[in-house]
Amino acid sequence: MFFGSLLWLPSRLRSKIEELEGFWVASQARFVSPLDEKNCNVDLIEGGYAVTMDIEASGGFTLTIDPPQPAPTVVSGTMAWDGKDLTVTVGETTGLGEVFLEGDQVAFRLSAGLEYDFKGDGEPIPARLLLVMDRVSGP
């Protein structure tokens, strides 16, 4: 699985935010709890979700997580990436992440500030969002 390979990718694959411009479709999307990775691990694609992200050269982005039912979740914000550190801001919340780019495939690991209700009990817990995406349009 691609996520297990994220740490070994060489730093030469890291680029600037302008290189992420385009419309991306997830081939892998997963919420994982850093507190309990084995038991709190949800594969969105396997669950029938469609996940897309539109990234502008300025760093503005819109992430859409579209479940089979009911309505999609749409999140907009800004990203800043200096080739090493990724910062994501949504509203008043700023989080950190990692990004690895190779051609028209990118992997994101977003962590700070995210929560997910793994048990469906209305009690979200801290989570990471792991994405592997293919660029389907862009520069």
Image (spheres, rainbow, N blue to C red):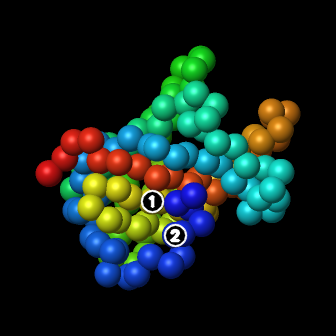
Residue depicted at 32% across the width and 81% down the height: 12
Q: Is residue 67 above or below residue 119?
A: above
Residue that appears at 29% across and 72% down: 15
Where residue 133 sits: x, y (%)?
Answer: 41, 49
Q: Are marks 1 and 2 in contact (CB under 8 Å)?
A: yes
Q: Would you say residue 104 is visible in this rendering?
A: yes
For the residue marked with disc 1, what is the amino acid?
Ala
> Alpha-carbon neighbours of circle 2 within 10 Å: few (<14), some, or many (≥20)?
some
* Crowding at mark 1 (Cα within 10 Å: few <14, some 14-19, many 20+): many
Q: Secondary structure at mark 1?
A: strand
The number of numbered discs placed on residues in the rendered structure image is 2
Query: In terms of depth relative to the viewer, which is nearer, 81 or 102?
Result: 102
In the current view of this chain or complex, which residue is farthest to the top?
Answer: 70
Give the residue pinned by disc 1: 107
In this view of the protein, which residue sits in the foreground, 54 or 103? Answer: 103
Residue 11 at x, y = what percent?
38, 82
Foreground: 81 or 45?
45
Q: Residue at x 80, y 33 (%)?
A: 120
Estimate the spatial distance between the alpha carbons at disc 1 and disc 2, rounded to whole Å: 8 Å
- Left of 118 or right of it: where is 7? left
Q: Is residue 95 visible?
A: no
Instruction: Determine whether, in the image, residue 138 is placed left or right of residue 104.
Output: left
Label 2: state its secondary structure: helix
- Mark 1 or mark 2: name the one nearer the start of the chain: 2
Q: Residue furthest front?
A: 1
Q: Which mark is residue 45?
A: none
Residue highlighted by disc 2: 6
